[in-house]
Image (cartoon, coloured by chain):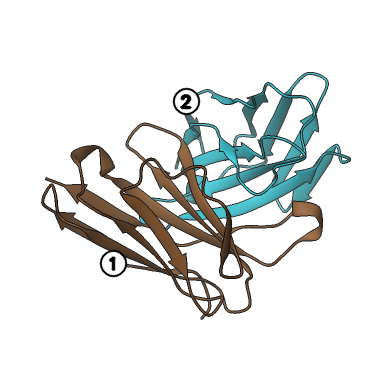
Chain colours: A brown, B cyan
Amino acid sequence: GAGVSQSPSNKVTEKGKDVELRCDPISGHTALYWYRQRLGQGLEFLIYFQGNSAPDKSGLPSDRFSAERTGESVSTLTIQRTQQEDSAVYLCASSSFGQGGNEKLFFGSGTQLSVL
Amino acid sequence: KQEVTQIPAALSVPEGENLVLNCSFTDSAIYNLQWFRQDPGKGLTSLLLIQSSQREQTSGRLNASLDKSSGRSTLYIAASQPGDSATYLCASPPGAGNNRKLIWGLGTSLAVNP
């Protein structure tokens, strides 16, 4: 596609429910990132994929959070047993494998998750 | 541990003014620094990326500088326009050995008034 696509754009769920957030990166981009932005706070790194592998999962807040990527394309971020503190905008970004990490990131519009 | 700070948190200027946004970082062994623009409901757009070996980058009316010794980067916007109204974020990897994730400032919310 022309850009990074995320779905849904908005998700309202009840505490304790599971949610899945989807990211379609730019075609051909090998790196994919998930970030979280809570109200009034800076972006927090969650996880990144190189191809279908996730070399760095250090930002996942708890074992309720998991992510996968298939076909070096679509990625899904799953949050189990959602809590109110999970409410945030979840942003996905992709990039081509740049020189030494000096890569330009392309972001999707995000999924606004509200846990009631 | 790299920390990124942006001042001011908000800025309001009349159209046509030249302005400077500031970004400070704590680790001078910076790998690169990026400036992004965030529009409501539209995600983030990468504006400029300055590598550690560079002093500045320019794109149109935007100029970003990097001073590693003082731990500062500035984003200069010339002849500001109402369409420049957005939140501007700076971000940097935590170190040369871990350049796959970014540490972010909280942003400067810019309003350019007609």
Tell me where residue A42 sits by quadrant: top left
Q: Chain of mark 2?
A: B
Q: Is residue B56 left or right of residue A76?
A: right
Q: Is residue B40 above or below residue A31?
A: above
At x 64% / y 51%, what residue is drawn?
A: B47
Check the image and report above or below for A55 versus A2: above
Q: In the rendering, at what x and y percent does residue B105 appear?
A: 54, 32
Q: Amino acid at mark 2?
A: Ala
Q: Residues within 10 Å of mark 2 (few under 14, many from 20)?
A: some
Name the image quarter holding residue A62: top left
Q: Which quadrant would the C terminus of chain B be assigned to in this image? A: top left
Label 2 to label 1: alpha-carbon separation: 30 Å
Task: Report if residue A109 is visible in the image.
Answer: no
Return the residue found at the far top: B70
Q: Position of residue A49 (x, y in %)?
A: 57, 61
Q: Which residue is mark 2?
A: B9
Residue A56 makes an appearance in the image: yes
Residue that protrudes farthest toward the right in the picture: B53
Front residue of A68 and A23: A68
**Residue at the far front in the pictured view:** A63
Element type at mark 1: loop
**Measuring 78% from the left and 18% from the top, which residue is drawn there?**
B70
Q: Residue at x 64, y 24 (%)?
A: B1
Report the amino acid beneath label 1.
Pro
Mark sitting on residue A8: 1
Residues at discs 2 and 1 in contact (Cβ within 8 Å) = no
Horizontal and vertical percent position of residue A74 = 46, 74
Q: A114 left or right of A64?
A: left
**Is B97 on the left-hand or right-hand side of A10?**
right
The residue drawn where x is 49% and y is 76% is A70
Q: Residue B51: name its quadrant.
A: top right
Secondary-structure class at tag 2: loop
